[in-house]
Amino acid sequence: MSRKHFIWIGFAVLLLLLVAAASLWSLLAGEMKIPLASLPTIFENKSGMEYAILSNIRIPRLLLAFSIGGALSITGAILQGIYHNPLVEPYTLGISGGAALAVALVIVLGLNMSLGTLVIPAAGFTGAFITIFLVYFLALKRREININRMLLIGVMISFVASSGMMFLMSISSADNLHSIIFWTMGSLDEPNATLITVMVVSSLAGLIISMLFAQPLNALRLGEAKAKHLGINSSAVIRILFIIASLLTGLCVAVGGIIGFVGLIIPHILRSIIGSDYRILLISSFLGGSLFLIVCDIIARTIIAPNELPIGVITGMLGGSVFIFVLSRSKQKMIK
Amino acid sequence: MNRSYLSIKNLICGYGNFSLDSLNFEIGKGVFAGVIGPNGSGKTTLMKAITGELKISKGLIMLDNKNLNQLSIREKATKIAIVTQHTEEVDISVEDYVLMGRMPYRTNFQFFETKEDLSIAEKYMHLTDVFRFKDKLMSKLSGGERQLAGIARALTQEPQLLLLDEPTSQLDISHQIQVLNLVQELNAQMGLTVLMIIHDLNLASEYCDYLLLLNEGKLYKKGTPGEVIDYKTIEEVYNTVVFTQENPLSKKPAVFLVSNKILTESRKNLTDKLPDGKI
């Protein structure tokens, strides 16, 4: 291993330690503050109030922040690499638009009342999945994926879905309108243990699988044709990575609603710090995204406690400001 | 010529309304061959057919008696390396870029470069004289330096055939000569077989052992530069009046272009001196 590889490992370990520190902070901070010293004893007394807060609220939220933040960020890094476009993020491809439209439809039709609350994440995932298929098959030309066409179709689907949302919102009652708006602002308040487990396992699996494509992603930085000259089956790699990115995004939207900016800004910031080699960018994007969303969740829960802000508001405001700051200081090109 | 190494048999391949018209030729091992011809004659189509970027409709492309179409993308990348006219202006260090040449030899599970990868890349960085700026970003190099890095990356693939697609079209004459001298040295020292698309007829004549002249998808003429480049052939294929003369040092043909104005003014005088079209 060379010096560069040791720097990579050191950087990944540093991010991991920061994620661990933020996780600890996330468990302790909130409307009811928990002292660090009492943390080990809380788990011994399972009937206590503090145990209930940790196991029912803070740990599930922490797990979701870790996995959704990581998944959205890694998805952004992958899509920016595939499309050679620094402005692509998980939601550019219309996935969030499709999911939001499906959720709005479920709320307006009152299905969440008659079929139970799980119908909302199910609708979100179905909407995301239908959009993925539409984008993919409409972008196929002579059995080859045209990535620019795919991007344009995604943007157009976003517009159509957004118009559909506005139509549904205009005909919905005040209660339904509130539910739709709240969902589109994103939330990590998901009590269902199965959904949380699926999210955590999927995001880690997404990380591991995409790491296997780190070298092909590096080759794709030179363009599809050049990557092929280096022995990379560009179209197969793009297809697989697109499916991974889409499924992860669909799952994130289904569980957490629309949490913007993570997939756009975190890979950018990390690129300017550690470079564009996907062997380090993917793992650091995952950890960076997790760290970012954990911190955003802490702020959302504590800044106007006992009330709570939607996490999408924090990711937008904090992420956008940090992004502008980093861009104004960075002399590097945005991508490649 | 040595025994056939790259062999193209009845090749039909193209897109839209254009297609190569049953192309046949052979190139021996260690030969530095050039493909010349006007725009739209099929040079790039031929290159894309060899690399597999374009599917061939009919015919065979054999390299060292192996059918290239039957090889996987990865296997093909261990046998053929390509340097194009635009070597990428990416924010990757020269060393990392050159190391990409080892990708065909690595599996997805092999995360870091091996010692062998590093030593092969270093060897070719020294050979192409890019080692001195190995830590610079590709985007910060001059066009000539970038082409040298492109050649280093291609050599790191340890190919049997080096394809060059107009490698000097973006360079000034000093860098054109630097790049082609290097390719010529590699061809002579390593016995590397080279197939180069080139527009500049004088560079083609000076550097290539063997030329293939394409016109409208057909192989118009093939042979040594002396056999292919003469004023009549060039005038027929390019529809342009030129004069040719033997380079006194290399003894290879050199092509001179003349503007229409000079041609009209001098036509009468020249006609007396040019019974066979040669000065």
Image: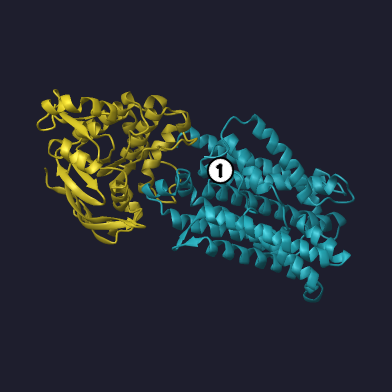
- Position of A192 with respect to A154 (left or right) is right
Residue A99 at x, y = what percent?
69, 63
Q: Quadrant of the N terminus of chain B?
A: top left
Chain B tint as drawn: yellow
Farthest-out residue, bottom: A114
Q: Is residue A106 above or below residue B150?
A: below
Tell which subunit mark 1 falls on: A
Farthest-out residue, right: A306
Q: Amino acid at mark 1?
A: Leu
Please tell me whether mark 1 sits on a helix, a strand or a loop: helix
- Position of A200 with respect to A234 (left or right) is right
The reply to whether residue A191 is visible in this rendering is: no
Chain A tint as drawn: cyan
Viewer-proximal residue, A321 or B119? A321
Residue in the picture at 76% in, 50% down = A312
Viewer-proximal residue, A190 or B125? B125
Residue A22 at x, y = what percent?
73, 43
Residue B193 at x, y = what percent?
21, 41
- Position of B113 with respect to A133 (left or right) is left
Residue tagged by mark 1? A281
Viewer-proximal residue, A142 or A93? A142
* Number of marks in picture: 1
Residue A40 at x, y = what percent?
77, 49
Q: Is residue B111 above or below residue A137?
A: above
Residue in the picture at 61% in, 57% down = A154
The reply to whether residue B42 is visible in this rendering is: yes
Q: Quadrant of the C terminus of chain B?
A: top left
Q: Is residue A94 above or below residue A173?
A: above
- Position of A164 with respect to B10 (left or right) is right
**Based on the displayed image, in which of its 4 quarters is residue A196 positioned?**
bottom right
